[in-house]
Amino acid sequence: MNEIGSAEELAERRHRLQGLMTADGLQACLITQNVGLYYWSGSMQTGYLFIPAQGEPTYYIRRSLSRAIRESAARTVPLGSFRSFGDALARDYPELFAEGRRPAVGADLDVLPAQTFLRLREAAPNVELLDGSAMMRRVRSVKSAGEIALIETAAQAAAAALELALGRIREGITELEVMTILESEMRRHGHIGLMRMRGYNQEIMTGMVAAGEAAAEPSYFDGPAGGRGLTPAAPQSASRRPIGAGEPILLDIGCCIDGYTIDQTRTAVIGDLDEELLRAYDVSVRILRHVESLLRPGASPESLYAEALRLADEAGLAAHFMGFGEDQVRFLGHGIGLEIDEWPVLARGFADPIEPGVVLAIEPKFTFPGRGVVGIENTYAITADGFRTLTASPERLYRLPIHP
Amino acid sequence: MNEIGSAEELAERRHRLQGLMTADGLQACLITQNVGLYYWSGSMQTGYLFIPAQGEPTYYIRRSLSRAIRESAARTVPLGSFRSFGDALARDYPELFAEGRRPAVGADLDVLPAQTFLRLREAAPNVELLDGSAMMRRVRSVKSAGEIALIETAAQAAAAALELALGRIREGITELEVMTILESEMRRHGHIGLMRMRGYNQEIMTGMVAAGEAAAEPSYFDGPAGGRGLTPAAPQSASRRPIGAGEPILLDIGCCIDGYTIDQTRTAVIGDLDEELLRAYDVSVRILRHVESLLRPGASPESLYAEALRLADEAGLAAHFMGFGEDQVRFLGHGIGLEIDEWPVLARGFADPIEPGVVLAIEPKFTFPGRGVVGIENTYAITADGFRTLTASPERLYRLPIHP
């Protein structure tokens, strides 16, 4: 097992990216985003990491150079003048530019701001800047044993926090108060304070706690249940609404420790759920069990999603599955690691068979407007012949006592 | 005073943007980023807000439509097919496209991902998509009385949290433990869990607490003191280092309540600071007082920065000012509101005179490698004839008792 951030592990990651570059006809990749920089260099300082299809990368640093030199396994140099970045590349990689060649360079255009993209095109007119984000996401979708071990560390912290919070839930406690208990406990374990998310405009810190009608409110958030949030200026996750007895309490939480993130959901209730919600919860568990029975190398993400849709439909709950009505999301789960919205997505269009090392959060949920959301979510690592569950929390509907 | 999010306040914001569009020869603006969407529509759902230079805006919503309709003061419609977005614009704004005209549309290209920018150009080939981010940032730099009142609400929460945390600092408590106390308390007051930041790759939740050598570690973070952080995967803010007696403890904290953010810094020490650090702290206070004496409508941000540099230099502390050596940042402060890195920046290149309603965080600090960071930071609102301090924490060097 390679140690996270070891020169060997970084070289292996780079070789996988270089293999895809060669297959796709790219001569290099340019990494600009913090998480990508960390993944391929071992350091998360501000700058640009240039990885040629053959040979050694260079990390061009704006700030902090001394910290990048200390942390990075790559050759690390000052960025110097951004406006002559193309000259620096031509100086450092003469073979790529020989005889007036203009190498095709894939960058992480799914996250790089357009303004910087346009400036890069001016600063390096000697390269053809293309979108290389898909190959970066493909490489990152397959985790090493060391990465999976870090996700398990985060899973332990989430489980400890959940147990603590469940013990403190009483009628009348607000969603925000429960969220704060979870956050403090996860922070104590080393949670960095947010779960990194790649999607534009998406924000998630420690997940969400929401109950009853507030949980079922539709939201911009790219997940099956966003929650009401505190105000229209933060329209997602926990609200100040007090939690009542008999309401489904959705605890969709996670944390990021040493860069790696866990994501999990459990449903709780003070007292008992009514029959319809209880049945929907049972269907979510049934879907998870069925998907697990198919979860192994070779399965296609889109087929797992289709199977979940089929079961939801058979149960008469299609309109409630993964959100309600026009606010439904069209996926069952997602890759997870350094970011919470990694590849593959369990959704139409993701047909490539999953491989050992892929880590997936799978989250069947049912939304009932005005009443709440029920469901379950585990994070799994795909193994040589099946899967391993990384989520550490006991898997059940948590029935909490009604206190006098 | 307009109520935040009222139709009147939103119209006033739009008219100011429309004035700048007309002056700059743009026929419309397209807002894509969550904070901008909220500022100009009252809602933060996923979609695109199109604001013509004359007439009424339209909010094209991907998700959640029902929530956007409820919250937004703008005309709100489903986005429909993204690939025919240009057709929707031509249908809704026929006068802009009459006789084959191709209107110039400014978008927030400083934050919009390049991939979406390129897709937008394909989806709306009938518009010329330009960078309109500077005019958006200019409009947002001038706050209404209602916006300033919200920043003061956040300031009260930060002050309460600081007081609580100072009472719990003992030798051996870790930076992370202090940070967690601050976070929990601010969350209780409605902190959304992060301070929004516009800069690419920048992350800040509740600020930073750092002491001694860990505070002085250089970082990628776009501020004078980033801090060590928890690991190279989160290389900024609080670390797990225990705080010792005699070390400067930098409490650079803030929170975001109902969208609006406060930013402030106080320095504390268990016992006493040595003479050199104490003197540097006094110089930071002297700089702040001097800048305050110049702080009124008409002052130019770059001249305030130059004055601060001059005082730091006269005190023989130029090499320590706003970071150390090559890791110094080149500013003294920044606009703040919905985001923490708003305009104007107190830096070279920001020559336009400040206006009433501008809100600035001003943060003179001195870094001593291996020893720590000292400094102070207040947030100010510019008034008709001067300024008002929004930060509520008492302003002093906090000397904490050494417990046996």
Image: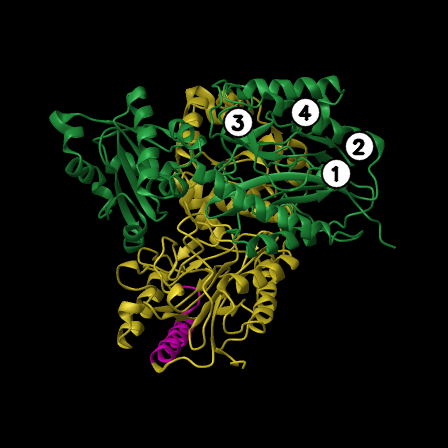
Chain colours: A yellow, B green
Disc 2, SS: helix
Q: Is residue B324 visible?
A: no
Which kind of residue does numbered mark 3 sit on? Val
Q: CA distance from mark 2 to mark 1?
A: 9 Å
Above or below residue B17? Residue A219 is below
Q: Which residue is mark 4?
A: B287
Read off the chain for label 2: B
Residue A141 colored in magenta in the image: no
Residue annotated with mark 3: B345
> Please, which residue is most extreme toward the right here?
B404
Residue B402 as seen in the image, left or right of residue B70: right
Q: Which residue is mark 2?
A: B278
* Rendered location of residue B377, percent (x, y): 63, 34
Q: Magenta residues, as a range? A: A276-298
Quarter of the N terminus of chain B within the rendering: top left
Sequence-earlier tag: 1 or 4: 4
* Chain of the residue where label 1 is placed in the rendered structure: B
Foreground of the two, A186 or A146: A186
Find numbered disc 1 in the image and state the secondary structure of the residue it sits on. loop
Question: Is A318 left or right of B150, judged from the image as shown?
Answer: left
Residue A58 pos. (x, y %): 57, 33
x and y percent of residue A210 in the render?
45, 65
Dot 4: chain letter: B
